[in-house]
Image (tube, rainbow, N blue to C red):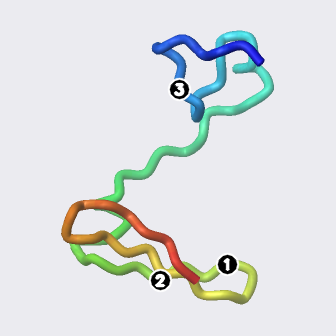
Amino acid sequence: MPSASSSESPFQPTARDRHAYPQPRRVDSNSLLGGQNLLMIEHAGCSYYLRMTRNNKLILTK
């Protein structure tokens, strides 16, 4: 498997793959969380919690 160059991110498609992967919608975490540290997300009948930690990390739990 070829190694990725330092300018390529594993989450960004390469130039040759861009036609196969549309750009994802980008949402700022501050607007998602609305100034709070916890957000409940409902998906397929289940509740998930997106929490911002004291170290400014995001954790998604079921």
Residue in the picture at 77% in, 18% down: 1
Residue in the picture at 61% in, 33% down: 23
Residue 9 - label: 3
Could you classify mark 2 by the number of other residues whose Cα lies within 10 Å: few (under 14), some (14-19), or many (20 or more)? some
Could you classify mark 1 by the number of other residues whose Cα lies within 10 Å: few (under 14), some (14-19), or many (20 or more)? few
* SS class, disc 3: loop
Report, in whole angstroms, how far the alpha carbon at label 3 lies from the one at label 2.
Answer: 29 Å
Residue in the picture at 75% in, 81% down: 44
Label 1 belongs to which residue? 43
Label 2 belongs to which residue? 40
Nearest to viewer (mark 3 / mark 2): 3
Q: Residue 13: horizontal and vertical position, in percent?
A: 65, 24
- In the rendered image, which quarter is residue 34 located in? bottom left
Could you classify mark 3 by the number of other residues whose Cα lies within 10 Å: few (under 14), some (14-19), or many (20 or more)? few
Mark toward the start of the polypeptide (3 vs 1)? 3
Amino acid type assigned to the residue bearing label 2 in the image: Met
Amino acid type assigned to the residue bearing label 1 in the image: His
* Residues under numbered marks 3 and 1 in contact, where contact means CB atoms less than 8 Å apart: no
Question: Left of 57 or right of it: where is 45?
Answer: right
Vertical placement of residue 54 versus 40, above or below: above
Q: Residue 7: horizontal and vertical position, in percent?
A: 47, 14
Report, in whole angstroms, how far the alpha carbon at label 1 lies from the one at label 2.
Answer: 10 Å
Amino acid type assigned to the residue bearing label 3 in the image: Ser
Camera-nearest residue between 56 and 4:
4
* SS class, disc 1: strand
Camera-nearest residue between 60 and 41:
60
Q: How many marks?
A: 3
Q: Residue 38: horizontal and vertical position, in percent?
A: 34, 80
Nearest to viewer (mark 3 / mark 1): 3
Mark toward the start of the polypeptide (3 vs 2)? 3
* SS class, disc 2: strand
Report, in whole angstroms, how far the alpha carbon at label 3 lies from the one at label 1.
Answer: 28 Å
